[in-house]
Image: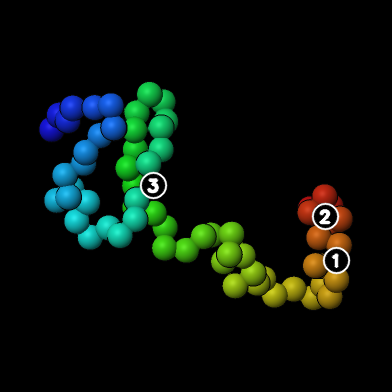
Amino acid sequence: MKAKVTEQGLLIPKELLEGFDEVEIRKQNHQLLIVPASESDPILQLGCEPVRADITDASTNHDRYLLSS
């Protein structure tokens, strides 16, 4: 499929976006990528499934533990 780029931009047919409420548009290596936007920000998911360990001060000294591993 070809589409004309106008002064306002590019019109993408609705049928190509079926099932998506939101998309992310990226420019990579001279290509435009249109991908479904993730439903949740992965940063907000940090800590949802913490690793169990015998260390009680990991949140305070995490840099020290990362450097020693």
The N terminus lies in quadrant: top left
Residue found at the very far front of the displayed protein: 7
Mark 3 and mark 1 residues within 8 Å of each other at the beta carbon: no
Q: Residues within 10 Å of mark 1 (few under 14, many from 20)?
A: few
9 w.r.t. 36: above or below: above
Q: Amino acid at mark 3?
A: Glu
First along the sequence among labels 3 and 2:
3
In the rendered view, does 6 fall on the left or right side of 67? left
Instruction: Please name the residue that numbered disc 2 is placed on.
Output: 63
Label 1: state its secondary structure: loop
In the rendered view, does 22 fall on the left or right side of 19? right
Looking at the image, which residue is at 51% across and 60% down? 41
Q: Position of residue 62 (x, y in %)?
A: 81, 60
Q: Amino acid at mark 2?
A: Asp
First along the sequence among labels 3 and 1:
3
Quadrant location of residue 52? Answer: bottom right
Quadrant location of residue 19? Answer: bottom left
Looking at the image, which residue is at 34% across and 33% down? 32
48 w.r.t. 17: above or below: below
Residue 60: mark = 1
Instruction: Please name the residue that numbered disc 3 is placed on.
Output: 24
Alpha carbon distance from label 3 to label 1: 36 Å
